[in-house]
Image: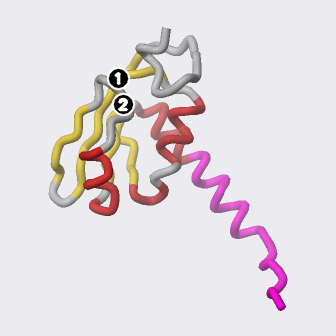
Amino acid sequence: MFAGALGVWIHEAPVVDIELRLDATWATYAKSHKWHPSQRVEPDGEAVRLTLRCRVCPEVEQWVLAFGEGAEVIRPVALRDTIAQRAQRLADRYRAARAPPEAS
């Protein structure tokens, strides 16, 4: 039931190849952490390429976003586009927000 899932989110999307490039900040963490049985981590200069095969769902999107600016989705293109849109909305929110009042 969970073979095609990154976590516990059950989603009817097809299982796809997901590839991320994680910068050097995340490289050691990625090499020592197991998110999915299909996961592979390969060097890419000081960065790493992390690949896995699972369904794209909101849980996967949140997982990618948790790496912040240290991650780039290489494939699938649809996930890359979704992350770019979410990052843009987040940037827009912070640009539009007023500065919080100073603490006393």
Near mark 1 (Cα within 10 A), the count class, few <14, some 14-19 or many ≥20, is: many
- The residue sitting at 18% across, 42% down in the picture is 42
Above or below 16: residue 80: below
- The residue sitting at 32% across, 42% down in the picture is 33
Q: Quadrant of the C terminus?
A: bottom right
Above or below 88: residue 56: above
Q: Which residue is mark 1?
A: 53
Q: Position of residue 101 (x, y in %)?
A: 84, 83
Q: Position of residue 39 (x, y in %)?
A: 29, 30
Asked if labels 1 and 2 touch by Cβ distance under 8 angstroms, the answer is yes
Q: Is residue 30 found left or right of 2 in the rendered image?
A: left
Question: How are the residues colored?
Answer: secondary structure
Q: Earlier in the sequence, mark 2 or mark 1?
A: 2
Near mark 2 (Cα within 10 A), the count class, few <14, some 14-19 or many ≥20, is: many
Image-quadrant location for residue 45:
bottom left
Residue at mark 2 to residue at mark 1: CA–CA distance: 6 Å
Q: Is residue 2 found left or right of 102 in the rendered image?
A: left
Amino acid, disc 1 = Arg
Q: Which residue is the extreme one toward the top?
A: 1
Q: Which residue is mark 2?
A: 18
Image-quadrant location for residue 17:
top left
- The residue sitting at 38% across, 49% down in the picture is 72
Query: In the rendered structure, does residue 99 fall within the stretch colored magenta?
Result: yes
**Boundaries of the magenta span:** 85-104
Amino acid, disc 2 = Ile
Q: Secondary structure at mark 2?
A: strand
Q: Position of residue 87 (x, y in %)?
A: 58, 53
Q: Which mark is residue 6?
A: none
Q: Secondary structure at mark 1?
A: strand
